[in-house]
Image (tube, rainbow, N blue to C red):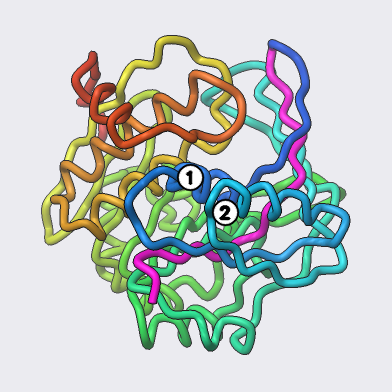
């Protein structure tokens, strides 16, 4: 039995910023797993990738992360372009991987399963239902809102959302994803709608402007922590959720978990690649300057 198990594809990533172009491993599962590397939590990653990229799994294992690697014909290949601003990216999907199945996860048990689909077909509704019947489910909803046309990623609604979210306890979305999901421009009303559909904790991120968590009919205003330098925002949301869920599984309050996740994400943005720091480094960051966004409606 794991405290947290993340399910998602490790990807090949091409990251383009105004500082240049880099090629690296990526995906929700990769950034999430690295962020928990040095935390005192019983953790496992379930991923699927081609044999040609198995080195990504071997590197995680060498660093102490337990990984269940399932075979796939291809590895997901993303191009993330932040050339204009680290708060905004455009994406292309150059290659996709095989989806996860109920049978593959039947013997994996955890307190919390964090689902990190990158595309709508990655994690089918049947798997959400099966996992939701025996554990708490956390979901980064972004993959269900992506449609690939001519390698370009387009924002679309998730047709199965109301049926699926009955089995999901925690949902993470950014402001634009929430708008697509709920068809409302009001962040607070959108969060309330997700709660009406069954979600117990709604986590909404605003990049450098902070985040908002809605739980038990209460809105928690989470500050943004100011990084020393802004280098690469890829994986910041995944890092945030790693910190948030780590603290929640340890019994922390929503507010404290949100602030820990936000501080963790601000450290990640200071360099390319995943966050691999310590709990102590995050706590030190939490003592530094932070800014609240008071304009969320």
Q: Could you tell me residue 199's position as x and y percent?
A: 30, 67
28 with respect to 292 (left or right): right
Q: Position of residue 282 (x, y in %)?
A: 30, 30
Q: Quadrant of the N terminus?
A: bottom left
Residue 132 highlighted magenta (yes or no):
no
Kindly tell me whether residue 297 is visible in this rendering. Answer: no
Task: Estimate how packed mark 2 is, as few (under 14), some (14 to 19) or many (20 or more) residues with alpha carbons within 10 Å.
Answer: many
Q: Which residues are magenta?
A: 1-18
Q: Against 278, is 106 above or below?
A: below
Give the secondary structure at mark 2. helix
In the figure, residue 49 lies in which quadrant? Answer: bottom right
Q: Which mark is residue 196?
A: none
Magenta span dominant secondary structure: strand
Instruction: State the SS at label 1.
Output: helix
Relative image position of residue 139 (x, y in whole percent): 44, 62
Give the residue at x 72% y 29%: 15
Q: Quadrant of residue 72?
A: bottom right
Left of 40 or right of it: where is 104? right
Q: Nearer the viewer, residue 89 or 56?
A: 56
The image shows residue 23, relative to residue 99, as above or below, that is above
- Name the mark on residue 29: 2
User: Is 214 situated above or below 132?
Assistant: above
Residue contact at pointers 1 and 2, CB within 8 angstroms: no
Q: Quadrant of the C terminus?
A: top left
Residue that label 1 marks:
238
């Amino acid at each position: 039995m794991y405290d947290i198990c993340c399910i998602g594809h490790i990807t090949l990533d091409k990251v383009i910023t105004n500082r240049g172009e880099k090629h690296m491993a990526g995906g929700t599962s990769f950034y999430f797993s690295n962020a928990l590397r040095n935390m005192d939590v019983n953790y496992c990653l379930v991923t699927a990738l081609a044999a040609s990229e198995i080195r990504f799994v071997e590197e995680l294992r060498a660093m102490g992360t337990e990984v269940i690697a399932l075979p796939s014909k291809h590895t997901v290949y993303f191009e993330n372009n932040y050339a204009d601003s680290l708060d905004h990216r455009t994406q292309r999907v150059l290659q996709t991987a095989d989806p996860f199945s109920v049978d593959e996860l039947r013997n994996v048990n955890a307190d919390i399963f964090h689902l990190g689909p990158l595309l709508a077909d990655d994690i089918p509704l049947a798997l959400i239902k099966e996992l939701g019947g025996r554990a708490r489910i956390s979901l980064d909803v972004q993959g269900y809102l992506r449609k690939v046309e001519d390698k370009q990623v387009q924002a679309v609604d998730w047709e199965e959302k109301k049926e699926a979210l009955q089995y999901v306890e925690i949902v993470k979305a950014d402001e634009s994803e929430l708008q697509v999901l709920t068809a409302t421009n009001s962040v607070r009303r959108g969060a309330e709608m997700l709660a009406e559909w069954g979600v117990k904790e709604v986590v909404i991120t605003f990049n450098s402007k902070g985040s908002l968590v809605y739980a038990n009919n209460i809105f928690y205003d989470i500050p943004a922590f100011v990084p020393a330098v802004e280098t690469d925002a890829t994986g910041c949301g995944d890092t945030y959720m790693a910190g948030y869920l780590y603290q929640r599984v340890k019994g922390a309050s929503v507010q404290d978990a949100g602030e820990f996740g936000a501080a963790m994400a601000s450290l990640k943005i200071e360099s390319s690649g995943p966050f691999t720091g310590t709990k102590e480094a995050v706590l030190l960051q939490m003592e530094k300057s932070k800014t609240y966004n008071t304009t969320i409606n």
